[in-house]
């Protein structure tokens, strides 16, 4: 072990001694950061557990209440079934519309557009996330529904053999299809922003190597950018899906609801989503009815958690396959 050496000209410690004196401070900083990160993770887990405990404790009685509580249904499963179907349909419509546009916009900003155009476009897309949901609901119910009404008629005439586009179409355009379009616009900035960031973080050497091998720009994106950004893209889609599943006012202001179970997304009426059903009925509900609505919130919590768990498992499996390749 070397002994500390003092410089004869300046009297300062040699580098080995200086490094030895820096280690306690560095280790202390590492411990503080590790503690803060651990506390943040534990806090999130505790918050999730607290939400679950509250929903279960307050909504447990709603799972097996008197038959009159579930009217017009007769039990909890028949009450929650149409709400779950409508919630998933609206979220699927939103994802089918928003994800291709979001990925295309993110690629345009990160790989195609010059900076003078990409920066303003990115700002405009990000500003969409700041628009309140009630504004989207007003716009969707008063203008977009009327604008899309001819599309409802066309879908019914040409694709009416499918259960999703059966007749009669909505005469005012207020349907699950319109609600899904509104949700797609609302989740577009979330998916776009996350996809744009992960696309921009693709190692430059990977892109240059693909181009050097003769790949076109699209082939470079397909074989270099997409594999690297896959997990980030899935995370963005899951965040967008979470908002689509939990959106309340925009759906409540657009959708004309009915208790009947249907797959027809362009019809006159469809079941409300779980979140919008809670928002519309909670304030004036009796205590037993409030317990029922909280129980439906527990179902929505479980569905959202399950979807995110499956998505993270798929991403993790793909990453492990890439690591072994």
Image (cartoon, rainbow, N blue to C red):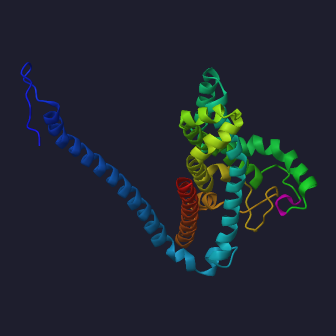
194 left or right of 9?
right
Q: Which residue is drawn at 40% across and 56% down?
A: 44
Image quarter where the N terminus lies is top left
Residue 165 shown in magenta: yes
Residue 267, position as x, y percentages in the image: 82, 58
The number of numbered discs placed on residues in the rendered structure image is 0
56 left or right of 222?
left
Q: Which of 116 and 143 is in front in this view?
A: 116
Q: Main secondary structure of the magenta part?
A: helix
Q: Can residue 142 be seen in this view?
A: yes
Residue 155, position as x, y percentages in the image: 88, 52
Q: Can residue 134 be seen in this view?
A: no
- Please identify the residue farthest to the front as the structure is shown: 1
Q: Which of 18 and 62 is in front in this view?
A: 18
What is the quadrant of residue 221 in the picture? top right
- Judge whether 282 appears above or below 31 on screen: below
Q: Which residue is drawn at 60% across and 34% down?
A: 209
Residue 185, position as x, y percentages in the image: 67, 43
- Judge whether 227 appears above or below 43 on screen: above
Image quarter where the C terminus lies is bottom right
Q: Nearer the viewer, residue 265 or 99?
A: 99
Tell me which segment is drawn in magenta: 163-167
- Judge whether 28 appears above or below 73 on screen: above
- Please identify the residue farthest to the right as the structure is shown: 157
Q: Which of 309 and 226 is in front in this view?
A: 226
116 left or right of 164?
left
Q: Which residue is drawn at 34% across and 50% down?
A: 37
Residue 101, position as x, y percentages in the image: 70, 41
- Please identify the residue farthest to the top as the structure is shown: 9
């Amino acid at each position: 072990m070397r002994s500390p050496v003092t410089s004869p000209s300046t009297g300062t410690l040699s580098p080995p001694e200086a490094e030895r004196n820096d280690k306690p401070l560095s280790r202390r900083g590492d411990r503080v950061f590790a503690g803060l990160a651990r506390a943040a993770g534990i806090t999130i887990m505790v918050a999730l557990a607290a939400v679950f405990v509250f929903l279960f404790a307050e909504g447990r009685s709603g799972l097996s209440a008197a038959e009159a509580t579930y009217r017009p249904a007769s039990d909890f499963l028949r009450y929650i079934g149409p709400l779950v179907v409508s919630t998933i349909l609206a979220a699927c419509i939103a994802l089918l519309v928003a994800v291709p546009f979001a990925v295309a916009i993110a690629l345009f900003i990160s790989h195609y557009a010059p900076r003078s155009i990409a920066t303003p476009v990115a700002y405009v897309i990000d500003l969409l996330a700041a628009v309140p949901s009630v504004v989207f609901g007003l716009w969707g119910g008063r203008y977009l529904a009327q604008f899309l009404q001819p599309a409802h008629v066309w879908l019914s005439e040409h694709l009416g053999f499918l259960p999703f586009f059966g007749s009669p179409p909505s005469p005012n355009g207020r349907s699950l299809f319109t609600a899904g379009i509104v949700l797609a616009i609302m989740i577009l900035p979330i998916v776009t922003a996350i996809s744009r960031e992960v696309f921009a973080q693709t190692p430059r050497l990977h892109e240059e190597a693909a181009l050097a091998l003769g790949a076109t720009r699209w082939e470079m994106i397909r074989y270099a950018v997409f594999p690297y950004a896959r997990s980030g893209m899935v995370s963005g889609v899951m965040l967008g899906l979470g908002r689509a599943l939990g959106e309340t006012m925009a759906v409540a202001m657009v959708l004309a609801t009915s208790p009947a179970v249907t797959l027809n997304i362009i019809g006159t009426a469809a079941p409300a989503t779980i979140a919008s059903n809670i928002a519309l009925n909670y304030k004036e509900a009796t205590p037993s009815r409030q317990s029922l609505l909280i129980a439906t919130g527990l179902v929505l919590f479980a569905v959202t958690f399950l979807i995110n768990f499956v998505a993270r498992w798929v991403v993790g499996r793909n990453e492990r396959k890439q690591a072994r390749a």
